[in-house]
């Protein structure tokens, strides 16, 4: 029992995703996302997203969670998005709960299947093991969501950085469009 965690409570602002207490924050700028978009941007210091984490030991007996705040914007029509990743432990599942804004959750398996699901306040997206996942903000306001996953999942960014996702989400005249990624797997 000696290494059992004590219970604790965190407040989450259900609109802006901020946690109280705020324990661990990561931010990704356009510079961090270099090479992820088809186009390029002159701005490098702009923050694209922040992740507010509730750290727990990274074991398969804990549930890690965080909120993500993904800003609105695009680069040459490709909406702002997260890097996206597989879990290092490939079979580890995850749940996203939409808090505000409008997004798309792009998912893909290593053998090239893909799925795109809606994200908005009240959506509960189930990401099964084996599916890489990336959030895309297709609205005019920040996309905010809560994520919970098995503590030892780990994040494999390298595979996505190399291959990308099979599809891209771009700004069309009649709204967001899902198109084949011309650079997929290259
Ligand atoms: C999320 C993501 C978060 C940021 O908490 O880590 O939205 O996206 P990237 O990790 O792809 O930069 C999650 O899926 N955790 O497993
Ligand atoms: Zn994940």
Image (tube, rainbow, N blue to C red):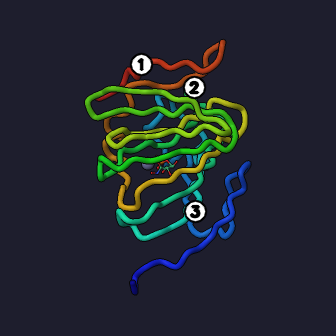
Point out the tag, 1 or 2, that comes first from the N-terminus. 2
Point out the tag, 3 or 2, that comes first from the N-terminus. 3
Extreme-bottom residue of the structure? 2
Q: Which residue is mark 1?
A: 180
**Residue 46 seen anywhere in this rendered image of the structure:** no
Height in image: 185 above or below 134? above
What residue is rendered at 49% in x and 49% in y? Answer: 32
Q: Residue 69's spot in the image, x, y percent?
A: 63, 48
Q: Quadrant of residue 11?
A: bottom right
Local packing at callout 1 (Cα closer than 10 Å; few below 14, some 14-19, many 20+) is: few
Q: Which residue is mark 3?
A: 25
Q: Residue 30's spot in the image, x, y percent?
A: 55, 44
Disc 1 from disc 2: Cα separation = 16 Å
User: Which callout, 1 or 2, points to the residue nearer the camera?
Assistant: 1
Height in image: 38 above or below 160? above
Q: Is mark 3 within 8 Å of ligand 1?
A: no
Point out the tag, 1 or 3, that comes first from the N-terminus. 3
Q: Secondary structure at mark 1?
A: strand
User: How many numbered marks does the figure carry?
Assistant: 3
Q: In the visual, does 126 lie left or right of 174?
A: left
């Amino acid at each position: 029992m000696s290494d059992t965690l004590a219970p604790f409570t965190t407040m989450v602002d259900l609109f802006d995703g901020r946690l109280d207490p705020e324990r661990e924050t990561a931010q990704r700028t356009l510079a961090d996302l270099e090479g992820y978009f088809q186009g390029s941007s002159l701005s490098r210091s702009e923050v694209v997203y922040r992740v507010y984490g509730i750290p727990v030991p990274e074991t398969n007996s804990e549930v890690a969670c965080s909120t993500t705040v993904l800003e609105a914007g695009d680069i040459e029509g490709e909406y702002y998005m997260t890097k996206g990743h597989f879990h290092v432990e490939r079979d580890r599942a995850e749940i996203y709960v939409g808090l505000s804004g409008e997004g798309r959750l792009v998912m893909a398996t290593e053998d090239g299947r893909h799925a795109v699901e809606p994200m908005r306040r009240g959506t509960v997206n189930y990401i099964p093991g084996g599916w890489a996942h990336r959030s895309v903000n297709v609205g005019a306001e920040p996309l905010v969501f809560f994520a919970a996953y098995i503590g030892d999942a780990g994040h494999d960014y390298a595979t996505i950085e190399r291959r990308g996702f099979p599809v891209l989400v771009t700004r069309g005249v009649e709204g967001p469009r899902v198109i084949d990624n011309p650079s997929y797997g290259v």
